[in-house]
Image (tube, rainbow, N blue to C red):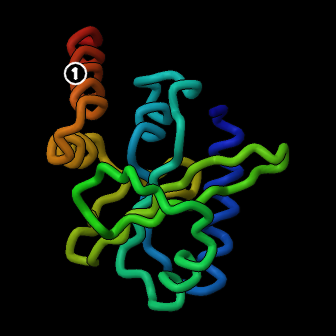
């Protein structure tokens, strides 16, 4: 995925969600954060991960309705995940995983990419470690390698 595709999709989805919940609290997470920070190339980002903190019932209902595909092979340990396909201007679908979180887990200190808050690397690594999937273990090893090489 290119950075421009990423930004276009995030801007559109967040703008639409904010029409239903003006005080929407969210953060971008996952591999796109690594691309934002220059840790991995954009062309390795395959989807967009967004955490919604304490969304309204209306938002949850809306996301449930527009969820284009039920991903039966979901390997995340949580049931609080909604996957949607966002169709960009070139009719290319982009998978967006939206994680639902409770407000207690919302970080108080935020880092921003453009106007969008992003999840800090330690929080992403903690989540990836808890998933215990091969691809997440590989991501963790690559992040450690990146930081060791930059010393």
Left or right, 130 with reference to 29: left
Other residues around mark 1 within 10 Å, as few (<14) / some (14–19) / many (≥20): few
Q: Can residue 51 be spotted in the picture?
A: yes
Q: Is residue 2 above or below residue 114?
A: above
Q: How many marks?
A: 1
- Seen from the viewer's position, the closer of residues 144 and 108 is 144
- Estimate the x, y position of residue 107 in percent, counting from the top left: 27, 63
Q: Position of residue 148 (x, y in %)?
A: 21, 13
Specify the quadrant that holds the C terminus.
Answer: top left
Specify the quadrant that holds the N terminus.
Answer: top right
Q: Residue at x 49, y 36 (%)?
A: 36
Question: Which of the pair 73/82 is nearer the observer?
Answer: 73
Query: Which residue is disc 1 drawn over?
Result: 141
Q: Position of residue 19 (x, y in %)?
A: 66, 83
- Please tell me which residue lies in front, 70 or 103: 70
Quarter of the image for residue 20 reads bottom right
In the displayed structure, 28 sits above or below 22; it is: above
The single residue placed furthest to the bottom in the displayed view is 57
Residue lying at 48% horizontally and 39% vertically, measured from the top left: 32
Please state the horizontal and vertical placement of residue 23, each as a whole percent of the image: 50, 83
What residue lies at 45% left-to-right and 88% top-to-bottom? 56
Closer to the camera, 109 or 1?
1
Residue at 60%, 76% (x, y): give it: 17
């Amino acid at each position: 995925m290119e950075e421009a595709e990423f930004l276009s999709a995030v801007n559109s989805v967040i703008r639409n969600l904010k029409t239903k919940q003006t005080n929407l609290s969210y953060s971008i997470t996952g591999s796109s954060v690594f691309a934002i920070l220059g840790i991995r190339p954009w062309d390795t980002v395959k989807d967009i991960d967004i955490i919604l903190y304490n969304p309204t019932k209306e938002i949850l209902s809306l996301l449930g309705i527009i969820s284009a595909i039920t991903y039966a092979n979901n390997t995340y340990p949580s049931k609080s995940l909604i996957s949607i396909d966002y169709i960009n201007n070139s009719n290319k679908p982009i998978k967006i995983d939206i994680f639902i979180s409770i407000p207690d887990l919302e970080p108080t200190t935020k880092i921003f990419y453009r106007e969008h808050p992003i999840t800090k690397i330690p929080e992403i690594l903690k989540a990836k470690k808890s998933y215990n999937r091969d691809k997440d273990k590989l991501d963790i090893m690559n992040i450690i390698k990146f930081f060791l090489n930059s010393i």
